[in-house]
Image (cartoon, rainbow, N blue to C red):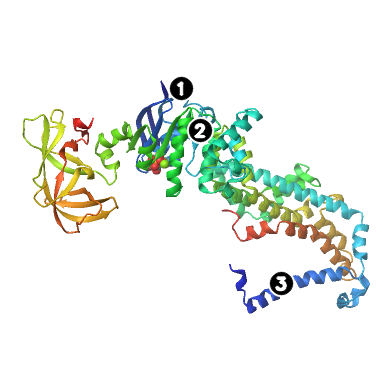
Amino acid sequence: MATLELSNIRKAYGGTPVLDDVSLSVAEREFIAFLGPSGSGKSTLLRIIAGLETLDAGEVRLGGERIDPLPPGRRGVAMVFQHYALYPHMSVRENMAFGLRNARVPREEIEARVAEAARVLEIEAQLDKKPAQMSGGQRQRVAIGRAIVKQPRLFLLDEPLSNLDAALRMRTRVELAQLRQRVDAAFIMVTHDQAEAMTLADRIVVMNDRRIQQVGAPMEIYSRPANTFVARFVGSPAMTLAPAALSDGEGPFARVRLASGAEVETRVPRAGLPAGDGLLLGLRPEMVSVTAPGAGTADAEVMLLERLGERTLVYARLAGGQDVTAEDKGDSPLRTGDRIGLRLDGAAAHLFGPDGAGHHAEAAR
Amino acid sequence: MDRGRLTPVGWAALLLGALIMVAPIVWTLLLSLKHNGELVGHSGAALHGPYTLENYAAIFGNSSTLRWLLNSAIVALGTTAGVLVLASLASYGFARLEFPLRRTLFVIVLLGLAVPSQAVILPQHQLFAWLHLHNSYPGLILPGLIAPFSVFFMTTYMRGIPRELDEAAMLDGASRFTVFWKVILPLTAPAQSTLAVFTFLGSWNDYWWPLISATHSDMYTLTVGLAAAQMNYAQTSGLGYLMAQAVFASLPIFVVYIAFQKQIVRAMAGTAVR
Ligand SMILES: Nc1ncnc2c1ncn2[C@@H]1O[C@H](COP(=O)(O)OP(=O)(O)O)[C@@H](O)[C@H]1O
Ligand SMILES: [Mg+2]
């Protein structure tokens, strides 16, 4: 059964549309990540669910009940804000109890819930401190604690990790993952960090340009991007997209020719592909390996090297001017300006039609 | 600023400044402790004894003085309370609520800053006469509640409070009023105390309106009452008494300054609004 149901949501600020016909269904206890570049409407959608923003059209249902006409406090959702939004003049204990007091929860019950949340989040020693006396990581925990005590059906988190330093972000990420195991609720987390989305979410909702671009499990988003936007946005470094034309042939799989003349045999079924050229061949860096000149699919010149330790990223340029990102071993002997060959692994390549829609190798399923 | 880095010249300048500021106060204090007759010939007599408290005794001997003190306290505290309540409510509206003509109304409030109270004193006097408010506490307090600067100051301060706090409170099930009362208002405490100090001092020191409005001596405030009491014989034969009045009238102000030093300094430095 779906916990949260968004149907045909529209939102514009002034005359500028921000969300255009957005629909989404979130299952019980599911962890959803809204992933997209800044300004893509992620926060707006989250705030519409929370009731902090009105919608122009559409419906929001939670547990079957229509909640979009309800005020934020009556929706059974809790939110963790990007800047925590702890009440500076209240102690940690009061911060966590505030919502329960407003809901007229009995005192003993409030105390019990606050104590339990403090125990789980290991902030028992901080209960009488004010937020200003705490570190960023501790404040983050209080913000999460304030959400937990309300026992909501749905947690909403807006970029919850973006204000933490790298080490703390990793740790909090793990703790969030543990938290969702313990809590009987669904989660929606807004992020522009794909690593966060990939590691935490059951399903990722990729947003851009007012719309949901793709909804899917992390590996599905990664290996079967629905369109060129998702292909480019997910994965680091970004997938190479090279203009290609469909070659004549009889086989069941498409064979394409790049501008440089190189031919790549893909495992993308020929049936269903749009005829003619205007295709884009999509290659993740790990599908492109370095060979001796002449020994690969195409020859190229090394433009830039990024040595990451366990691997080296090779930014190379094909004869036709097309840039391709390849991967080499960590102690790669390559140098900028070297002439190399590139082996393009067609079996794992993607094709994108002129409309941007993705077509994927069958084997990847 | 690095406090340790004050040069000897800097010290000397500060010391000189402090002396210049303090000298008249000390002089006033010394004069107030002298017998009036001794000062008639030569006020330099204040530099040596004998000193006496008779001038202060005379102030309290005037049965009206305590009444005026009470009036001043009621008017100053009433004005302060009224300004804080009105400025807080109005500012919350301007800072947080959406309503028609909000900007226009705010501009009108700001225009109030440009209207000197002298310019409206005649119609104001007439209006209070019609309403039979002269010689009453409301009559003395109400004009002080016209406080455009306080509204502007508090609105600016509230706008500096992150909206996320309101939103968090709304998600915590708080009503509009609860958000105002339990979240926003406590966070304006520094602004409230700054406004309170300045409103109190301004009201305590006010002379003109109570002089015009309070014509019965039992409704005088301290400033008006003391001024009225000195008319006949001050300057010439009552210098010591005059100075004792000045000291007495400014005592509450000293107390307020000392108690709220921090707020005053912060407000002067313009850092009260973060
Ligand atoms: N209150 C607002 N008024 C006008 N425009 C807004 C408002 N809030 C957001 N927007 C605009 O809506 C778009 C989406 O914003 P947002 O949902 O915050 O994006 P994201 O969270 O994905 O970065 C942006 O172009 C932003 O400028
Ligand atoms: Mg955002």
The residue depicted at 28 percent of the width and 37 percent of the height is A222
In the rendered structure, the answer to whether residue A16 lies left or right of residue A272 reads: right
Which labelled disc corresponds to residue A78? 2
Ligand 1's quadrant is top left
Whether label 1 touches label 3, CB < 8 Å: no
Q: CA distance from mark 2 to mark 3?
A: 57 Å
Horizontally, is A87 left or right of A309 in the view? right
B215 left or right, relative to A98 = right
Q: Chain of mark 1?
A: A
Within 8 Å of ligand 1, the CB of disc 3?
A: no
Taking depth in this image into account, of B8 and A324 the one nearest to the observer is A324
Q: Say whether mark 3 and mark 2 are on the same chain.
A: no
> Quarter-wise, where is residue B245 in the image?
bottom right
Residues marked 2 and 3 touching at CB (< 8 Å): no
Q: Is residue B207 visible?
A: no
- Disc 2 versus disc 1: distance between alpha carbons? 15 Å
Q: Amino acid at mark 1?
A: Gly
Distance between the Cα atoms at labels 1 and 3? 72 Å
Q: Earlier in the sequence, mark 2 or mark 1?
A: 1
Residue B182 x, y percent position in the rendering: 63, 39
Do tag 2 and tag 1 residues touch (Cβ < 8 Å)? no
Disc marking residue B18? 3
Image coordinates for residue A348, horizontal then vertical, percent: 19, 37
The residue at which mark 1 appears reads as: A63
Q: Nearer the viewer, mark 2 or mark 3?
A: 2
Chain containing the residue with disc 3: B
